[in-house]
Structure formats: structure tokens, C-alpha cells
Image (cartoon, helix red, strand yellow):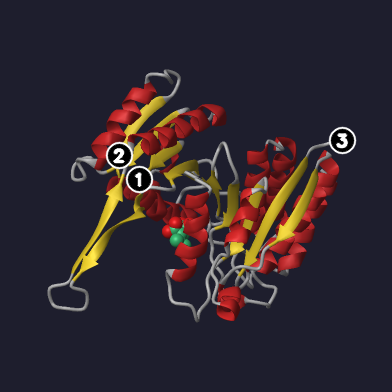
Amino acid sequence: MGKNYQIAVIPGDGTGPEVIAEGIKVLKAASRIYGFNLQFTHHEIGGKYYKATGQVLPDEMLQSLESSDAIYLGAIGHPDVKPGILEKGILLKIRFHLDQYINLRPIKLYEGVSTPIKNKGPEEIDFVVVRENTEGLYAGAGGVLKMGTPDEVAVQESINTRKGVERCIRFAFDYCRKRGKAKKLTLCGKTNVLTYAFDLWERTFYEVAKEYPDIETDYAHVDAICMWMVKNPEWFDVIVTDNMFGDIITDLGAMIQGGMGIAAGGNINPDGVSMFEPIGGSAPKYTGKGVINPIAAISAAQLLLETLGETAAATAIEKGIIKTLKQDIKDIAAGKMGFSTSEVGDLIKNYIEHN
Ligand code: IPM
Ligand code: MN
């Protein structure tokens, strides 16, 4: 008998439920074949729930998420809800409460997917960003004085703790070793200007590096990283960085790997409950049309299984994604795939079943 896993599902808003349904379809097929059990519990939080109840994330729901083995999230965001309420009240709340201190973002261009970068292909675009996920500018430190007056002052401080920085850097070194590709870890910072925060990052990076003599170390400023990601993406294997820089460079990464229809991420607590999501958002204008690409959500499901340790099943999902992108889908953009959302899920499910 295989293991049993409790998966908390937050389909969320917009096209979230449509893509999550395909992810679950694929997860169920993989679990049947690879001999483990997944039990899905759905939670109806998101913009719609907030509009109807005035509640963002009730405590009992947070507790229930806490007792699951992993969380599978579709998308949060509603055109009629002021920006910030749902992002902070759901996404960031879960990340912080469950101490998901790593945001893991693979940037991998698959064959058959076009990148806006000229003369670069799957050989050149294959790296991973390890973003710190609970500190930095996201910690919420700061405040406002004299709001609404001409003398208004707004302060938003970046919090960097030795513990938080070190555990993120250690995760990145371990991940780089396990990945076993170029065994090169690049620290992305801004040591020439942010001399307090990134001094801490830099010192910690080189101290921890002594324990990983097999990993080559490298450093680049965040602005330079943006240039190199476009000009020479093949230079990168694993990049580690703080929360804000990580947020920015992973959107750039999503574009060079083909776009939001492909990009997935994990919010990881290596000793706790992790959460996996397609990073594309709720795409309200495509809602209910069955045209949105579910591959990002299916990649998130793959990351979920990888993190649970079901690596054979995760690999089978990735193989299914690779075949679908190479052989079937015309274009990864919504409405241009040549297949509906659920047909793409069926294709990948089929490949897993006839692997
Ligand atoms: C992401 C998103 C979030 C972030 C937003 C929605 C709060 O952009 O996961 O990258 O900034 O972290
Ligand atoms: Mn982001």
C-alpha cells in the first residue's frame, strides 16, 4: 500500500478552478499508477467568497490547511476587490503563517514553446530561482505619517534576519547539489547600494559555501541579472535571492520560458506544509471559456509531488507535459492551443497512463 496524502485545494477565482480541475485529473491518474493515495479537500476562499461573506481567510480554514500534507492553489484575485486585500489576506498570510520560507521557481523552456529571446532554446533556458519568501520588503515593516497631507511620509523597510537568510541560502545550496546540473549557485543582490541587507546576504552566502566545496559560487547585482537572463540565460543553474528581487526576476523568467501559461511555483516549508500554484493569476476575461492553458497548474502539481517525495509520478507528469507541448499544442497562449483546457488535461493524463 502506498502512502496517503491530504491535499488542501484552493481553486480560487477566475480561471483558477478550471486549471486546478485539470491538475487534479492528472494527479489522480499519477497516484493510481504510482500507487499512492491523494485525498482532496476543497476550500472556497478567494474573491467570490470575500464578496459574499466579508471574510478573507477564516481561522478554522487556516487550521485545516495547516493539518494537510500540501496545498494546491489555483488563483486569487477579483476585479471588484481592491488590490492587496486578497493577496495579503490569503496568499501572503498562508506563506507567513505556514513559514513557507522558500519560493521555488523553475525557469525551463520546453521544446515546442517559443521564447521571446532570439537564438536561445531549451538548451540555454533551464535554471531555477530560489526566492526568500517570508522576509525582506514583504515582512510589512514600516508605516505612514501625516497621511493625505503634503508632508506625508511612507516608510517600508526590508527585514533580513541571519536565520532567515541562512536557511534560504542553505536550501539553495542543497537544491543545487541535488539538481546536479552545472552545480553553480548565483547570489542575486545589490551589494553596491543596499550595503546593510546584502552585506548580510553576501557574508552568509560565502560562509555557507565553505560547506559545499562541490558547488561553484557566483554573484551578480539584480539589475545585471536582468540583463544576463535575457542575453545569456545559459549562465545560470540556480539563483538565490531575497523576496522582492525574487518576485521581479521570476516574472522575467516566466516570460523567457514561454509565458504565464507555463510558469509554476512552490511556496515551500521543507519541514512543514508547502503550497503549489500556477503563477499566472485569475485571468477574469477567460473565465468559463475553457480556453486557458492548464499546463502551469499541471506543472505546479508536478512540483507538489516532487516535494512530497513521489518523484517517479512527478517525472511521469513532466514527461506528459513535454510530449503535449512538443507534439500536440499549437501555441501555449489562451485560445490558441488548438485544444480546450480539459482536452489538454486529457492529453497529459493519457501520456501518463501510457508512459
Ligand atoms: C507572486 C505574486 C505575489 C507576490 C503577489 C500576488 C502578492 O506576484 O507570487 O510572485 O508578490 O509574491
Ligand atoms: Mn510575483
* Label 3: element kind: loop
Q: Position of residue 318 (x, y in %)?
A: 68, 45
**Label whose residue precedes the other's in the sequence (2 or 1):** 2
* Label 1: element kind: helix
Q: Residue furthest left?
A: 151
- Residue under the point 51% across and 59% down: 91
- Residue under the point 21% across and 78% down: 148
Q: Could you tell me if residue 104 is visible in this image?
A: no
- Residue under the point 65% across and 54% down: 64
**Other residues around mark 2 within 10 Å, as few (<14) / some (14–19) / many (≥20):** some
- Residue under the point 69% across and 51% down: 321
Q: Which mark is residue 228?
A: 1
Q: Which residue is mark 2?
A: 220
Q: Position of residue 180 (x, y in %)?
A: 54, 28
Viewer-side label of 3, 2: 3
Alpha-carbon span between mark 3 and mark 1: 48 Å
In front of the other: 41 or 348: 41
Amino acid type, residue under disc 3 in the picture: Met
Alpha-carbon span between mark 2 and mark 1: 9 Å
Q: Which residue is mark 3?
A: 1
Alpha-carbon span between mark 3 and mark 2: 48 Å
Amino acid type, residue under disc 1 in the picture: Trp
Label 3 beta carbon within 8 A of ligand 1? no
In front of the other: 99 or 172: 99
Q: Position of residue 346 (x, y in %)?
A: 79, 60
Horizontal arrangement in the rendering, residue 5 relative to residue 247 (left or right): right
**Other residues around mark 3 within 10 Å, as few (<14) / some (14–19) / many (≥20):** few
For the residues labelled 2 and 1, say whether their Cβ atoms are less than 8 Å apart: yes
Q: Position of residue 133 (x, y in %)?
A: 44, 48
* Label 2: element kind: strand
Amino acid type, residue under disc 2 in the picture: Ala
